[in-house]
Image (cartoon, rainbow, N blue to C red):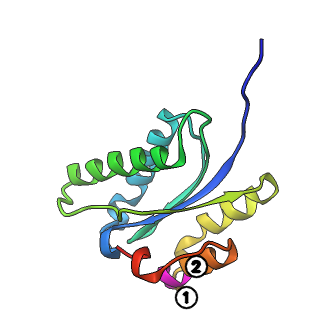
Amino acid sequence: MSQSLSKVYVHIVFSTKQRQELINEGVRKELQAYMVATFSQLSSYVEAIYANPEHVHVLATLPRILSIASLVSKVKSSSSKWMKGKGIQDFFWQDGYAIFSVSASKVETVKQYILKQKQHHQRTYFKDELREFLKRYNVEFDERYVWD
């Protein structure tokens, strides 16, 4: 009997609509746990997650049975509803996202990068961080359409 097997790691980044700082410390850990559970329900294992006030980083496996767009859409939709249920009625995620492949040999490096987001963003703005990732991964982009 043949099998289809995979282990693809991805680093996913997306922000709140207009980069509003709506993810406060009081809800951050709960949101992260909720998102980890949502990924799990979609057959994606989360290695690391960190919700900054205006954006999220996730290192996860890409499930064999879902497209990238479907995975991200389901997580964003579900977690947006959850945040509204927590009383943040004007909560929305940006329409887009960024996603980068991560080799198995770099999983620990990316994991540590994500877990140190609080310290990282004391000296680096989110827009600069994302621009750097896009350049490092040779992703062509138009500034007019990256930020919504």
* Residue drawn where x is 69% and y is 46% of the image: 8
Q: Which residue is mark 2?
A: 120
Q: Which residues are magenta?
A: 125-129
The numbered dot on residue 111 is none
Q: From what the image shows, is residue 7 above or below residue 95?
A: above
For residue 112, side relative to residue 36 (left or right): right
Q: Is residue 20 visible?
A: no
Q: Which residue is mark 1?
A: 123
Q: Is residue 105 visible?
A: yes
The residue lying toward the viewer, choosing from 127 and 114, is 127
Q: Are marks 1 and 2 in contact (CB under 8 Å)?
A: yes
On whether residue 110 falls in the magenta region, the answer is: no
* Residue drawn where x is 74% and y is 64% of the image: 109
- Work out which quarter of the rendered image holds the N terminus and state it: top right
Image-quadrant location for residue 22: bottom left
Residue 67 appears at what percent x and percent y? 53, 43
The residue lying toward the viewer, choosing from 135 and 123, is 135
* Residue drawn where x is 57% and y is 40% of the image: 44
* Element class at badge 2: helix
Q: From what the image shows, is residue 12 above or below residue 72?
A: below
- What's under tag 2, amino acid-wise? His
In space, the residues marked 1 and 2 are separated at their CA atoms by: 6 Å
Which residue occupies the extreme right position in the image? Answer: 105
Residue 18 appears at what percent x and percent y? 31, 75
For residue 8, side relative to residue 11 (left or right): right
Residue 19 appears at what percent x and percent y? 35, 75
* Residue drawn where x is 47% and y is 33% of the image: 41
Give the main secondary structure of the magenta stretch.
Answer: helix
- What's under tag 1, amino acid-wise? Arg
* Element class at badge 1: loop
- Work out which quarter of the rendered image holds the C terminus and state it: bottom left
